Amino acid sequence: MQNPRSLDLETSEKASAATLGIYVQVPFCQTKCTYCNFHTGVVARSLYRPYVDAVCREIAESRALRDITVDTVYLGGGTPSLLDPAALRRIMDAIRHNYSCALEEVTLEADPETITAEKAAAWLDAGINRISMGVQSFNDEELRAAGRMHRRADVYRATEFLRAAGFQNISMDLIVALPHQTRATWESSVDALLAIRPEHISVYLLEVDDGSRLGKEIIAGGAKYGAASVPSDDAMADFYESACVRLAAAGFEHYEISNWALPARASTHNLKYWRREPYLGFGAGAHSFDGQRRWANVHDSSAYAAAIAQGRTAIETEETVTAAQALEEELFLGLRQLAGIDLARIQRDYAADLTVRVNKLLDDGLLQRDGDTIRLNAAKLAISNEAFVDLLG
């Protein structure tokens, strides 16, 4: 397999014209949430340092996209806030030392119970200026059923620590349709979120698949993990639509299906994914994209660390994106953004005629059109998958 890190990337027009985002995966958690289908796990703290060593070495030895200025970094997981602040600083120093940086947005994912006043101050000092807090719910019964370690009070305490340290860009997320969630508890969580008023809010629909313990139980018709008390699909759509109305009324711009932000607070890093701009991923299971190729590291954190320590590539998969795949990505990722997509540009760039499919979705009320721009109907976002299925054919 050819190593993408040694490829001549100057032919990538998209890469050369854009800034670069860097994602660092920290796949460690205190516990595995019942709804989680990510490649993360609970490991001994003694494994944290060898993993950070491997990430820093991978960053230092990478040669991909070295000619592009890095303006965003996202430290995700897992729960990267479990790492010692000094370890996070090492990772940030490795990025700054090996890449040309003009960092505007540096995000750290953090669980509320892991945030302390001391950590908050150290994170800011290390150059982290945005915190994405995994709240999920403000209802303790829902949090317990989901296997979360924090409780409602921890969110308020963590927010105070972050604000006192000087953080002015905080994102919080909620999950729709957790076990035991009702219309009343959902509205209460939204009430609490709006009272705190973070700069950014994400609202995710519960994913049901066999990649999580809760998903397996729901599919099997069982009762473990509160599976029998998960709200119906209709209730999920109702809760989501209520959030859309309430967040808009509170001054939050709905810029992507699952994301809202106060003015000028949209996630710059995540927009790179949705706009198909270049990004590099470091760590176990991290993905990269240079505008033409995608590649991903091995998911197992021990195998990843061992490969890097032995001077071997940790890349597990690599593919060149075909024109057909690129078109699908343009449509799927582009329509997730509420600003919509330029249909004329896409049809021109990909020599594709989407007239019949688009007209059907316009007739069905799933899409709206404004000149050459098409976008999802804001009133039908809860059933957006129907539009994606029909449009992608």
Image (cartoon, rainbow, N blue to C red):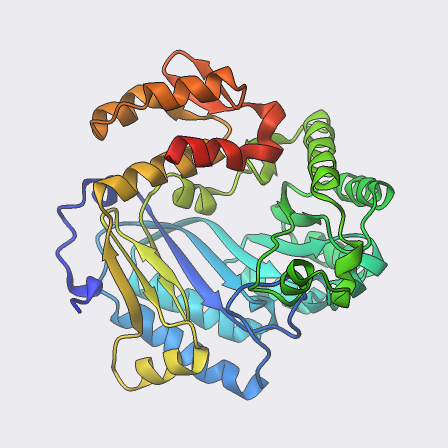
Residue 368 horizontal side relative to residue 167, left or right? left
- In the picture as drawn, the residue positioned furthest to the right comes out as 184
Image quadrant where one finds the N terminus: bottom left
Residue at the image point whose x is 65% and y is 55% from the top: 133
Tell me where residue 232 appears, x and y as whole percent. Answer: 74, 44
Q: In the rendered image, is residue 260 in sight?
A: yes
Of 199 and 179, the residue lying toward us: 179
Residue at image point 69% right, 32% down: 241
Q: Nearer the viewer, residue 103 or 191?
A: 191
Residue 385: % across, % down: 52, 37
Can residue 126 be spotted in the picture? no
Q: How many marks?
A: 0
Image quadrant holding the C terminus, namely top left
**Residue 242 spot, x, y in % from top left:** 74, 32
User: Is 16 placed left or right of 209 in the picture?
Assistant: left
Image x and y of residue 339, in percent: 47, 26
At 48% from the left and 83% from the top, the residue drawn is 49
Q: Give the residue at x 38% y 78%.
A: 304
List the single residue furthest toward the top.
371
Left/right placement of residue 65 relative to residue 221 reads left
**In this picture, is 66 found above or below 273?**
below
Q: Say above or below: 385 vs 309.
A: above
* Left or right position of 277 against 126: left
Query: Residue 259, located in which quarter of the rendered image?
Result: top right
Q: Quadrant location of residue 341? A: top left
Up the image or down, 387 lies above or below 105; here it is: above
Q: Nearer the viewer, residue 148 or 206?
A: 206
